[in-house]
Amino acid sequence: MRILLVLLMVLGLVLMAIVAIGALLPKAHVARRKATLRQPPEAVWQAITNVDAFPQWRSEVKRVERADHDGRVAWREIGTNGTITFEVVEAQPPARLVTRIADAKLPFGGTWTYELAPAAGGTTLTITENGEVYNPLFRFVSRFIMGHHATMNAYLRALGRKFGETTQPQVAD
């Protein structure tokens, strides 16, 4: 019984330390990744804006529902990450798209800015995440366990697979 009590106390101290460290981290962060695809900008634009087709190439998205969000283009992604509502903040086809998490109840939020630039034989897609993680425990996990780039890397790899390509996400300048 005494060993169990000591283990619980140690576990509690570790959890308190993680939350304390998370509380010291800034809520906001900026992360950038890029990948070059052998597709014209128009094809990449079509892929990243056709939200109804996301479940076909993004394995973590099981289904998409269109949503009404103050007259903006919006949708809910239902999948392994739960249900997240997004909205389009800005669209300049086929060069720039800005989307925002439109659910204030989540422990995180922010925008993704997609910039498409012609590259030799294709398109370089750069994603800039201006994110916020409100919960200190999630902030610790996001920073030290998952990393701020994990979701962007997965997205860029899935986009490459959609086109039958292997993409290698890179740090964007």
Image (cartoon, rainbow, N blue to C red):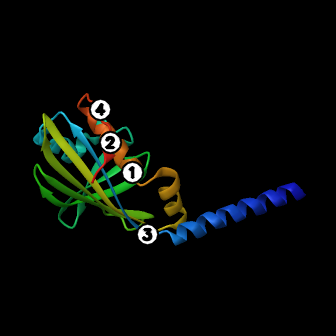
4 or 2: tag closer to the N-terminus: 4
Expressed as whole percent of the image width and height from the top left, the position of residue 56 reads 29, 35
Identify the element where label 4 is drawn. helix
Identify the element where label 1 is drawn. loop
Expressed as whole percent of the image width and height from the top left, the position of residue 148 reads 41, 55
Q: What is the C-alpha distance between the residues marked 3 and 4? A: 33 Å
Q: Do callouts 2 and 1 mark residues in contact (Cβ within 8 Å)?
A: yes
Residue 95 visible, this angle = yes
Residue 149, disc? 1
**Amino acid type, label 3:** Lys
Residue 93 placement, left or right of 173: left
Dot 2 crowding, Cα within 10 Å, few <14, some 14–19, many 20+: many
**Amino acid type, label 4:** Arg
1 or 3: tag closer to the N-terminus: 3
Which quarter shows the C terminus?
Answer: bottom left
Residue 169, disc? 2
Expressed as whole percent of the image width and height from the top left, the position of residue 107 reads 45, 64
List the single residue furthest toward the top. Answer: 164
Identify the element where label 2 is drawn. loop
Q: What is the C-alpha distance between the residues marked 2 and 1? A: 9 Å
State the residue in front, 82 or 101: 101
Residue 10 placement, left or right of 117: right
Residue underneath mark 4: 161
